Amino acid sequence: MGFEIKICGLKTPEALDAALAAGADLVGFVHFPKSPRHVTWEAAPRLAAQVRGLALKVALVVDADDALLADVIAALDPDLLQLHGHETVERVAQIRARFGRPVMKALPVAVRADLAPVSDYAAVADRLLFDAKPVPGALLPGGNGRVFDWALIRGLDAGRPVMLSGGLDAGNVVEAIAATGVDGVDVSSGVETAPGVKSPEKIQAFIAAARRARDIAAPCSNLSPKAQAS
Ligand SMILES: O=C(O)c1ccccc1N[C@@H]1O[C@H](COP(=O)(O)O)[C@@H](O)[C@H]1O
């Protein structure tokens, strides 16, 4: 798997088009009604069909029960389930076994102690995603545009591919990649003009910057992220 760039919170055909045209490796669809990025049941199958294999489809859920997961999978046919709630290690293992889809577990990070469960989650998840821990009482567990101290995960060997998120944008993603050495980056609010409103220009700028950073980290390769992943 090569370095990967994920654009999350896509809910319109135009925004999805912008992400695909800019070369996103993964595109994320949020199923969480409290989010301004929530994708309706009506829109989900149409957006999923629009991807046409140009990127991996990621379904983002928060503490979803089995019935909801089954519905989300039926609507999106995702390549990856992003579990962005308080799912326990046991629940992650159960979801992976029960639904037969790869899972990426999001772990909220604010201080070093938040990394204590990494090895337990790495044992049951296909990938890990480090995101900034939300402030107490926040409406959303992610998508808050908050940055955490990247030094906390610098050089961390989780034994699984690791993505970084939390307050990334075109202006800081190069530094974030250099500071952490992660396998991929994920952005939502940093490519928006307002909560839930994606900007094609910001998506394009983010992907271009992340690619530059990847190329600095791997100067011998001039393959695209997708080609490296295959
Ligand atoms: O984007 C959302 O609305 C969202 C809702 C619930 C859980 C996670 C959500 N987004 C994820 O949060 C991180 C960070 O986002 P941001 O770039 O800081 O806005 C990212 O992984 C999104 O996939």
Image: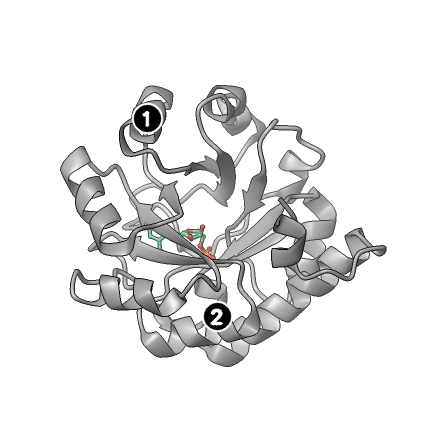
Q: Earlier in the sequence, mark 2 or mark 1?
A: 2
Identify which residue is drawn at 27% across, 28% down.
Answer: 98
Q: Amino acid at mark 1?
A: Ala
Residue 217's x, y, as percent?
A: 78, 52
Residue 111 is left or right of residue 3, and the answer is left
Question: Mark 1 falls on what kind of element?
Answer: helix
Residue 107 is left or right of residue 5, and the answer is left
Residue 118 is left or right of residue 196, and the answer is right
Q: How many marks?
A: 2
Per the model, the C-alpha gap separating discs 2 and 1 is: 30 Å
On the question of residue 135 being in view, the answer is no
List the single residue furthest toward the right: 220
| Residue sitting nearer the eye, 229 or 137 | 229
Identify which residue is drawn at 66% across, 28% down.
Answer: 157
Residue 75 is left or right of residue 14, and the answer is left
Residue located beneath label 1 in the image:
97
| Residue sitting nearer the eye, 192 or 113 | 192
Residue located beneath label 2 in the image:
19
Indicate if the residue with disc 2 has its beta carbon within 8 Å of ligand 1: no
Other residues around mark 1 within 10 Å, as few (<14) / some (14–19) / many (≥20) = few
**Mark closer to the observer (2, 1):** 1
Identify which residue is drawn at 24% across, 62% down.
Answer: 44
